[in-house]
Amino acid sequence: MPIEVKMLVWVLVLLFVLILIQVMTTVLGYGLPAAAGNREGLPSTKPGFGGRVDRAIANLKEGLIFFIPIVILAAIFKVSNEMTATGAMVFAGARYGHAVVYLAGIPWIRTLLFLAGVVGLVMMLMGLGLPGALFA
C-alpha cells in the first residue's frame, strides 16, 4: 500500500477518534436521552471543550476535501515519489498535531499546524506534477 494511502487511513482514524470524543462530550454535556434523541433542543454551538471538538472535526473534514482527491489521483496515476510521500506525511502529522492543539485550546500553534497541512497538500500536488501539467 502506498504511503499516501496509509496516511489517508491514519487521518481517517483521527476523524473517527474525534467523532467518538464528540459523542462523549455530547452525552456528558447534555445527557444520554438528549444525545440519543433528535437533538432539536440542543444548542448549535457547544461551549468550551465540546465546541472545540466540533470545530476540530469540521476543520479536519475541510482538509480531507482536498487530501482525499489528491491521494486518489496519486493512486490512479500510480504516482508515489518522495514529494507525494513526504507531503502526505506532513499533512497527516500536521492534522494530528492540529487536532491535539485545537482540543487543548492553543490558538497560534493551531494555526501554524493548519498551515503545515496546507504545505503538505501543495507538496503532494507538486509531486503529481501539478499545477505545471495543467498548463502543458
Image (tube, rainbow, N blue to C red):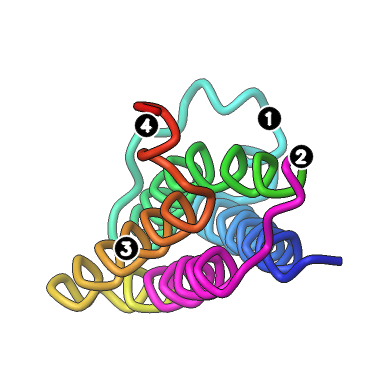
Reading the image, the residue beneath label 4 is: 44
**Does label 1 or label 4 sit earlier along the sequence?**
1
* Residue pictured at 53% horizontal, 48% vertical: 67
Q: Position of residue 105 (x, y in %)?
A: 25, 73
Q: For the residue carrying disc 2, how many other residues have a C-alpha within 10 Å: few (<14), some (14-19), or many (20+)?
A: few
* Residue pictured at 39% horizontal, 48% vertical: 59
Cα separation, mark 1 vs mark 4, equals: 15 Å
Q: Nearer the viewer, mark 2 or mark 4?
A: 2
Q: Nearer the viewer, mark 3 or mark 1?
A: 3
Circle 3: element type: helix
**Does label 2 or label 1 sit earlier along the sequence?**
1
Circle 1: element type: loop
Judged from this view, the residue extending furthest toward the left is 108
**Does label 3 or label 2 sit earlier along the sequence?**
2
> Residue flagged by tag 2: what amino acid is it?
Ile
* Residue pictured at 78% horizontal, 66% vertical: 2
Tell me if residue 131 comes above or below residue 126 in the rendering: above
Circle 2: element type: helix
**Does label 3 or label 1 sit earlier along the sequence?**
1
What label does residue 107 carry, if any? none
Write down the region rendered in magenta. 77-99
Cα separation, mark 2 vs mark 4, equals: 39 Å
Q: Nearer the viewer, mark 3 or mark 2?
A: 2
Reading the image, the residue beneath label 1 is: 37
Number of numbered discs visible in the structure rendering = 4
Reading the image, the residue beneath label 3 is: 119
> Residue flagged by tag 4: what amino acid is it?
Ser
Residue 81 part of the magenta-drawn span: yes
Reading the image, the residue beneath label 2 is: 76
Q: Nearer the viewer, residue 67 or 107?
A: 67
Q: Nearer the viewer, residue 107 or 124?
A: 124
**Does label 2 or label 4 sit earlier along the sequence?**
4
